Amino acid sequence: MSARTLGRPRRTLAPLTAVTVAALVFAALLVLVRLQWLPLESVDHGAAADINHLIAGNHTLVTASKDVTLLGSTAVLCGVIGAAVIGLAIRQRWKLAIYLLLTGSGALVLDPVLKSLVGRLRPLVAHPLASGTGNSFPSGHSLGSIVCYGAVLLVFRPAARGRWRPAFVSMVVALVALIGISRILLGVHYLSDVLGAWALGIAWLGVTAFAFELTRRAAGQPVSAPVREGLEPEARADLKPAQPESAASHARTPHPGRIAAGVVVVWVLILGITVGVGNLVTKHGNGNVLGDRTIPRWLAVHRTPSLTSWSLIFTTAGGTACILIVSAATCTVFIAITRHWRPVIYIAILMAGELGAFLAAAAVVKRPRPGVTHLDHRLPTSAYPSGHVAATLCIYIALAILVIGHARGWWRWMFLIPAIVMPVMVALSRMYRGEHHPTDVLGSVVCAALWLTATSLLIRPSTSSRAAGRQPGLSRRPGLADRQAVTQPAGPRAS
């Protein structure tokens, strides 16, 4: 990008025109919906009834719509913004992090306020497919998705070059469109609710982007077109998620194909061991191996309200949602700090393999739950092995391995505490709640220990950090130093 392009304010009026038109469209829809204009009400109600009649019997389309609409939920959008903000903060791009926080917060504020002011009821259809809370106009999912994903696009667009740039834009546009369409298909919003949310989202993105430009001009920084070049084009090096591994790292790492083959072979063997232990305990044991009968009964007899509350906390911490959150946070932090994909690949393979082994072993062994009152109901899998314990072991020990392998300083050893405490507390909570026998926990420990050892030896998640020659601290931050080195004049060369 030339200095001329960055130094001049944009001369095209297309962005300003688009934002103005979007604001006018939203204002018009707001007034018409608030006044209950009959032609608009007729179109909205007729479309809602016709769409509901068409898809009510299509189970595949309904399921797909529910899956897509989750991507526009508050929890997912907060997770996306939160992960992006963490990455930007680690890379010290504070202005962009603040921009994401303020822009996303605006959507959270505008949605409930406008819904309360308009007071439009949600559609009433013959075959309800989903339910929504609050009023109908504008669509919160549609507004949140266009604002949050659009802000992420404006922030990270400089990192996309060549053919990846149109692919990035197309992916965001398609995602926002599908989320809005899913709200209409599920019958929880009218067509004008979604259109109004999109118009408001475009207007809000335009206002926040213009405000960001003003801060750059006030600071004497070059201004470009955010829609084409992103909010901070010069931040491209820090916005790229990762960089290629060094030659030294490649030299000491086996070929990816051999690693993948090794992972598959080891996973199959570990699954066989896990299933074998389960069949041995359930079919050839005396029924009370390691206290399989007495310990669950003793724990059930000694239940108290306080212990039950604590058990719920730790069993929730070992559940799918919390494990996914910890895994995503770990991946975000380490890719932002190390600038390498290896820690992310390590976590992804580790947790996917653990989940696959757990589901396969549970389906084969089919062990009944302990014969006591269960505090958790309608669990989809059998007792052996404990998925909570295996997942907790894998993620917290993996986190300790990554921190100890990449960090310098005494504090890194503190991560051994959750790696030990969390699996123990989750295991006790699962047995206390009557969901697992002691041998179920043992099978999980065996499976997780073998899988952790195998993936750590095969993938070597700290190899790239060691090859980079780290300084004291968590890892080297190459972006800023490299850019400074490039901009410094070269010294005299030795002859």
Image (cartoon, rainbow, N blue to C red):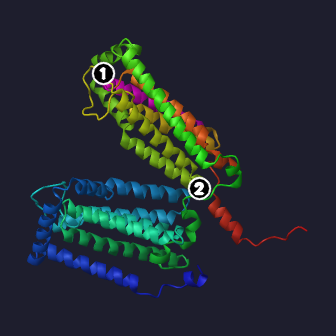
> Can residue 490 be seen here?
yes
Identity of the residue drawn at 35% across and 25% down: 436
- Figure quadrant of the N terminus: bottom right
Task: Please state which of residues 397 and 457 is positioned toward the viewer in this rendering.
Answer: 457
Using the image, determine if residue 11 lies above or below residue 368: below
Secondary structure predominantly adopted by residues drawn in magenta: helix
Position of 229 with respect to 480 (left or right) is left
In primary-sequence order, the first of circles 1 and 2 is 2
| Residue visible at 33% across and 53% down in the picture | 75
Q: Which residue is mark 1?
A: 370
Using residue 105 as the reference point, say whether residue 186 is left or right of it. left
> Could you say where residue 40 lies in the image, as x and y percent from the top left?
13, 75
* Residue ID at (25%, 79%): 25
Q: Amino acid at mark 1?
A: Pro
Q: Which residue is mark 2?
A: 339
For label 2, the crowd category at 10 Å Cα-Cα, with few meaning under 14, some 14 to 19 and many 20 or more, is many
Q: Quadrant of residue 373?
A: top left
Residue lying furthest right: 495
